[in-house]
Image (tube, rainbow, N blue to C red):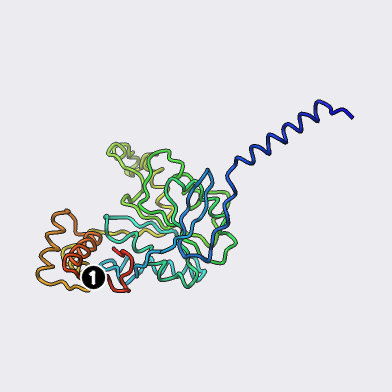
């Protein structure tokens, strides 16, 4: 029987679809959940997937000094989350090098055996948060989406996606997922002098502009705000002494003087600067490898 025009067209379409399908990237394999306690969201060939981190950061909570109040607040919130009790999304803001990111990594080290998992997501990939949530919804573990050094410019796609996941989508966020973000900006977006001039006065009350309201609307979706402040000299030297001890050295008078010069040269007395000084000093003193308790480039 001779083929009709429609049958020939259908065959050509089927052949075309087969050709297109062969060109598409393969569907990513399911995450290797047993391979690690930390994962990164990566996009390849237009598809995103969770990749296991072979060597998660080994920093411990007791390595973080000078931020006891912040540690207590975030550790308590994380403990509630791991115990399947109500807990909040967390925004860690403040001075650079004061331990914001290290604190999140230390929480993973503290609670990994109790089922905590860390999912690092870059700002540019926040639009994929719904896909990530779908991957972990039925999992028994507790997941923290970690967004490090987060800030937005106006109209970025990730800004709206993060707002929706935190609070504002028709779909509820998974019960086993929280977002912990660090930023040097309290409201995650740049703030300009003109915005202060746009405030209105009505009946003795001050009303912020719509622009200011929009910027605040994201940060206030984080239930727990934790602020970090610059260290004074005593705190800086305490941190430097701690890390020197991790390298098998001590804060001798010579090391103390050099630590102060090191901070002065960098214009900062942060925990990160103290850690960097300790590495340099220990290396120049021939102190050798760090103790096991100070494994893999831990810093504040």
- Quadrant containing the N terminus is top right
Residue ID at (31%, 65%)? 298
Q: Give the residue drawn at x 27%, y 60%.
A: 98
Label 1 crowd bin: few (<14), some (14–19), many (20+), radius 10 Å: few
Q: Residue 258 appears at what percent x and percent y?
A: 12, 63
Q: Is residue 85 above or below residue 188?
A: below
Q: Residue 94: x and y, percent?
A: 29, 55
Q: Circle 1 is placed at which residue position?
A: 288
In the visual, does 270 lie left or right of 160? left
Q: For numbered disc 1, what is the local secondary structure?
A: loop
Q: Residue at x 44, y 56 (%)?
A: 120
Q: Determine whether 198 is above or below 69 in the image.
A: above
Q: Horizontally, is 150 left or right of 238 in the view?
A: right
- Give residue 107's position: percent from left, percent from top: 40, 67
Q: Quadrant of residue 159?
A: top left
In terms of image quadrants, where is residue 5? top right
Count of numbered badges drawn on the protein = 1
Quarter of the image where the C terminus is located: bottom left
Q: Residue furthest top?
A: 5
Extreme residue toward the right, this view: 1
């Amino acid at each position: 029987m001779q083929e009709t025009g429609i049958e020939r067209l259908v065959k050509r379409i089927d052949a075309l679809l087969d050709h297109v399908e062969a060109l598409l990237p393969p569907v990513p394999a399911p995450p290797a959940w047993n391979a690690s306690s930390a994962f990164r969201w990566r996009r390849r060939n237009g598809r995103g997937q969770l990749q296991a981190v072979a060597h998660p950061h080994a920093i411990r909570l007791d390595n973080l000094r000078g931020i006891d109040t912040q540690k207590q607040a975030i550790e308590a919130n994380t403990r509630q989350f791991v115990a399947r009790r109500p807990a909040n999304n967390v925004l860690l803001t403040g001075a650079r090098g004061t331990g914001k990111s290290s604190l999140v990594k230390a929480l993973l080290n503290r609670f990994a055996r109790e089922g905590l998992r860390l999912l690092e997501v870059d700002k540019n990939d926040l639009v994929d948060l719904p896909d990530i949530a779908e991957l972990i919804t039925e999992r028994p573990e507790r997941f923290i989406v970690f967004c490090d050094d987060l800030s937005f410019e106006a109209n970025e796609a990730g800004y709206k996606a993060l707002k929706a996941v935190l609070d504002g989508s028709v779909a509820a966020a998974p019960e086993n997922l929280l977002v912990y973000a660090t930023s040097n900006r309290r409201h995650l977006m740049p703030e300009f002098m003109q915005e202060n001039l746009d405030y209105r006065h009505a009946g003795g009350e001050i009303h912020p502009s719509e622009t200011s309201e929009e910027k605040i609307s994201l940060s206030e979706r984080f239930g727990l705000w934790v602020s970090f402040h610059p260290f004074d000299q005593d705190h800086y030297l305490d941190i430097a002494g701690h890390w020197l001890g991790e390298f098998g050295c001590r804060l001798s008078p010579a090391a103390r003087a050099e630590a102060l010069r090191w901070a002065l040269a960098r214009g900062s007395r942060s925990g990160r600067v103290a850690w960097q000084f300790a590495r340099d000093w220990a290396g120049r003193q021939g102190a050798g490898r760090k103790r096991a308790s100070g494994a893999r480039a831990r810093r504040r």
